[in-house]
Amino acid sequence: MSTPRTLSQKVWDNHVVKEQGVTANDDGSALLYIDLHLVHEVTSPQAFEGLRISGRGVRRPDLTVATEDHNVPTENQDQPIADPIGRKQVEVLRQNTAEFGITNYPMGHRNQGIVHVIGPELGLTLPGMTVVCGDSHTSTHGAFGALAFGIGTSEVEHVLATQTLPQPPQETMAITINGELPVGSTAKDVVLAVLGRTGTSGGIGAIAEYRGSVIESLSMEGRMTVCNMSIEWGAKAGLIAPDDITFAYLEGRKHAPSGAAWEQAVEAWRALATDADATFDREIVMDGSECVPHITWGTNPGQVGPIASSVPDPDSFDSPQERDAAARALEYMGLTAGQAIRDISIDTVFIGSCTNSRIEDLRAAAAVAEGRSVASGVRTLVVPGSGLVAEQAEAEGLDKIFTDAGFDWREPGCSMCLAMNPDKLAPGERSASTSNRNFEGRQGRGGRTHLVSPQVAAATAIAGHVATPGDLA
Amino acid sequence: MKPVRIVQGRGVPLDRSDVDTDQIIPSDWLKQVERTGFEKGLFSEWRDDPDFIMNKEEHAGAKVIVAGPNFGTGSSREHAVWAIMQGGFEAVISPRFGPIFANNSTKNGLVCVQVEADISQAIMAAVIANPETEIVVDVERLRLEVPSIDIDVRFAMSAAVQHRFLEGLDDIGLTMQRADDISAFETTRPDYMPASS
């Protein structure tokens, strides 16, 4: 009998490029084959330049896909990008992908969108694959039972040249969430509650598997939201075992297998689940009841708590470092210890990003917005994750629901997640945002970010202050 | 990358936790397509404050960043490593590093010295009290030394990374020597695996 293994160990083992039968080097590192390499304009130019300098080519352009997402404006995409530096970066991506024979979905193409939205929706991301991208939120693809992680530009160059990456061994970790979600809670609340447990470093050194009845009950969109934020608590990657929900999402997608190949694939994918007697190096067990609607109050995603609470007192933290970090965060955020979270007024609401811009996210936000109006003075952006998401939303009339309620309906891109395009916060402006990072200046210099679910974001836009859908009249 | 055997010099105390890569280099600076010039973006938002520690005369020319825990969390931007190195730093000391940042550092020759929290706090205190405090990061012996406070501890680095640091090797070249192994692996991939084109 072979040794029981976890999901991530199976995917890892299936991708080790062996050297004379040897699977790992002396230090335990292995050379892993990469099945899918996603590329965008920000972290790739220096990698392509490196290839040119050393006279190397791209080994597998057919396993590489590029799109333009970080720099693109979310209005007037039929026009060139106004910012000359951002425009140049996009033009350089077009030149590089043309030179090396890589498919690129440019701004305005229906398959264009946020890199972590388009991979799954085109059926390029499949269970059991290894997926990398020069972007930390590559962990999103783990929702399909793929081993997916973010890499730096040197590694982008390495994968372009060799379709492999040397990887040191990682510990395995289970995040088991039993029971069921409270009514009104979402996948975003699940991962924010995990962050409340782990802080920003609880997963460092590990590949995590999310499991338990709460995870199994989530849709693929919800699973992507959870896996997306794995890196925020330090995990190298976050995976969920593929099941019938996964297969139903994938069947019939553009690049997914079909016919006999589909049957063969599903059989292989079912075998990926963690063996019953496999053990993890670390485990966190939570109950679904902990995943009440959450919001961040500080300047890292671990500074988070239930919406039905108040801004914490820095003195309530155990370590001097946490106290210092909390005090610094409250000062930056312009908040007072003890203030009720629901009393926080919001200037801007952003619904979008690789965390929450998929069709289900937009449906959930639209259900809250329908028949209501955005509070006066609140700026809103609803940004679909891709051209296909936008098409679907428009076919369902969601854009109309949003615009009737006073929300601004935009074109696909990373938008206000990271302040690399015209969608930014002004200094001192405060947002409720469905994105993934509330770092200082992340959404614009001096901007103040509160991370929430799409439902809470929509309710907050209508109330003008932090609110859940249940708070609305 | 250039060989790195020893880093010897003064430190700058960055006494706060969770310094993410958005702080190290804000996203405005990521639009460049070149690999140089990122020192101008290093901590650019904090640097506007004249009281920011890196603006202090007494820390000019420091080679080592002495940081709180969780240094380099967040975005995968390798620009953060480039900015730190182009800003004149050769090593960072912290009790814990963001994993992608730490990995990116190994590709460029920036030494991430992970030490126990009490050691890092002692070094932080020493550098704050005396900016002239000398720090030695010896990659060959994997020792971190601060002679003035009698610190001499081992730090971890995988043998493969240490070898590349000492020899200044590019790991793409090493992997390309295994082209036959990679080709052999490719023949075993299932037929249902998707291609983009």
Image (spheres, coloured by chain):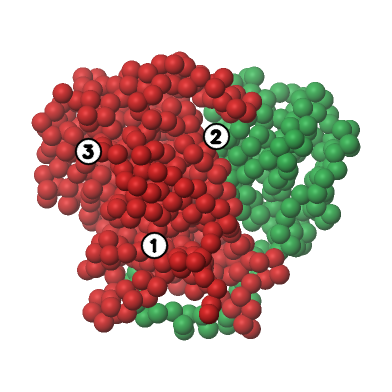
Determine contact: label 2, label 3, CB under 8 Å: no
| Three-letter residue code for mark 3 | Ala
Cα–Cα span, label 2 and label 3: 31 Å
| Three-letter residue code for mark 1 | Ala
Q: Earlier in the sequence, mark 1 or mark 3?
A: 1
| Three-letter residue code for mark 2 | Gln
Residue B61 percent location from the top left of the image: 76, 33
Q: Secondary structure at mark 3?
A: helix
| Chain of the residue where label 1 is placed in the rendered structure | A
Nearer to us of marks 1 and 2 is 1
Front residue of B122 and A116: B122
The chain coloured red is A
Q: Is residue A37 visible?
A: no
Picture quadrant of residue B173: bottom right
Q: Secondary structure at mark 2?
A: helix
Residue B160 percent location from the top left of the image: 71, 64
Q: Residue at x 60, y 66 (%)?
A: A166
| Chain of the residue where label 3 is placed in the rendered structure | A
State the residue position of label 1: A241
Colour assignment, chain B: green
Q: Is residue A358 above or below residue A366?
A: below
Front residue of A332 and B56: A332
Picture quadrant of residue B136: top right
Residue A171 percent location from the top left of the image: 58, 58
Front residue of A96 and A208: A208
Q: Residue at x 21, y 34 (%)?
A: A408
| Chain of the residue where label 2 is placed in the rendered structure | B
State the residue position of label 3: A365
Q: Residue at x 28, y 78 (%)?
A: A263
**Disc sitting over residue B23 in the figure:** 2
